[in-house]
Image (cartoon, rainbow, N blue to C red):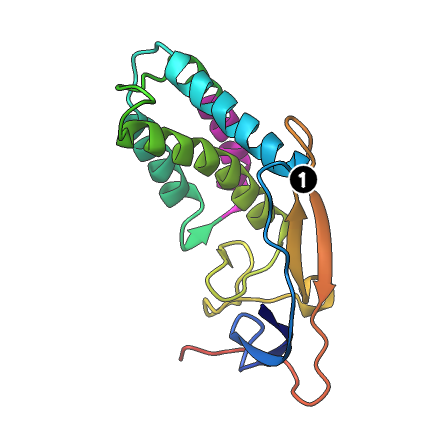
Amino acid sequence: MLPSCSKMIAPGSSRRMMRATIFCGSPVSVSKPRADQPEFKQSVADMEGLTKKLLGLNGKRTVNSFHKELGALLWEKCGMARNEKGLAELLRQIPALREEFWQNLKVAGQNDELNQNLEHAGRVADFLEFAELLVQDALHRRESCGGHFRTEFQTDDGEARRDDANFAYVAAWEYAGPGRPAILNKEPLSYEEVHMSTRSYK
């Protein structure tokens, strides 16, 4: 039994300073998934296929080397401050790194033992997909807001310059399948009692 809940978003002094409060009402029943359901079987098959693929690679690079390279790229070009040029470069570099990952990775150990290298490889495979989407979203949002600081969108005195007219929404990117661009879904930020304001760090 799980409680049925509704979510209320309360804005603070800026769009990025929001808090979600959960209000729970009467409980609702949720059926326990069964191992004979098609979705369960497909999930198991997908994981077994991924495990076999990772262990079948016989490259020369470790999982850790790919993880560190991806982290360095994101830190340099999609960190606290980023710009269009660096983000566009990342959208070329990350797919190239992902391609090398699936061709030149070496995962030590086997599947019939506790294998942290295998676990790490699965996570880095996910990170490579997520990193590209992260950069895509950062490039799409042509403004500076909160921790998302685009250096080409700032005031004369160095403050973040938001664009509430075009970007006052929550972006939810939908996975569309391998090799296909993600689909952008927008949830507008509409406030009835509180008006959005610009934060100043002076």
For image coordinates 55% across by 36% down, the residue present is: 88
The residue range painted magenta reads: 83-98
Q: Is residue 93 magenta?
A: yes
4 relative to 36, above or below: below
View extreme (top): residue: 58
The reply, left or right, for residue 78 in relation to residue 188 is: left
Where is the N terminus found, in terms of image quarters? Answer: bottom right
Q: Residue at x 65, y 26 (%)?
A: 179
Q: Which picture quadrant has residue 75?
A: top left
Q: Residue beneath label 1, please? A: 182
Among the 4 quarters of the image, the one containing residue 7: bottom right
Locate residue 184, reporting x and y percent: 71, 48
* Residue 58 relative to residue 24: left or right: left
> Circle 1 — which element?
loop
Dominant SS in magenta: helix
Which residue is nearer to you in this view: 44 or 122?
A: 44
The answer to whether residue 10 shows anywhere in this view is no
Q: Amino acid at mark 1?
A: Ala
The x, y position of residue 112, in whole percent, is 31, 22
Seen at 58% across and 69% down, the residue is: 2
Q: Residue furthest bottom?
A: 193
- Rendering coords of residue 40 (x, y %): 60, 37
Q: Position of residue 103 (x, y in %)?
A: 43, 13
State whether residue 33 is above or below residue 11: above
Q: Choose between 115 and 186: the one closer to the eye.
A: 115
Report how many numbered discs are placed on residues in the image. Answer: 1
Q: Nearer the viewer, residue 35 or 69?
A: 35
Verify whether residue 158 appears in magenta. no
Neighbor class of circle 1 (other Cα within 10 Å; few <14, some 14-19, many 20+) is: some
In the image: residue 177, left or right of residue 105:
right
Which residue is nearer to you in this view: 21 or 165?
A: 21
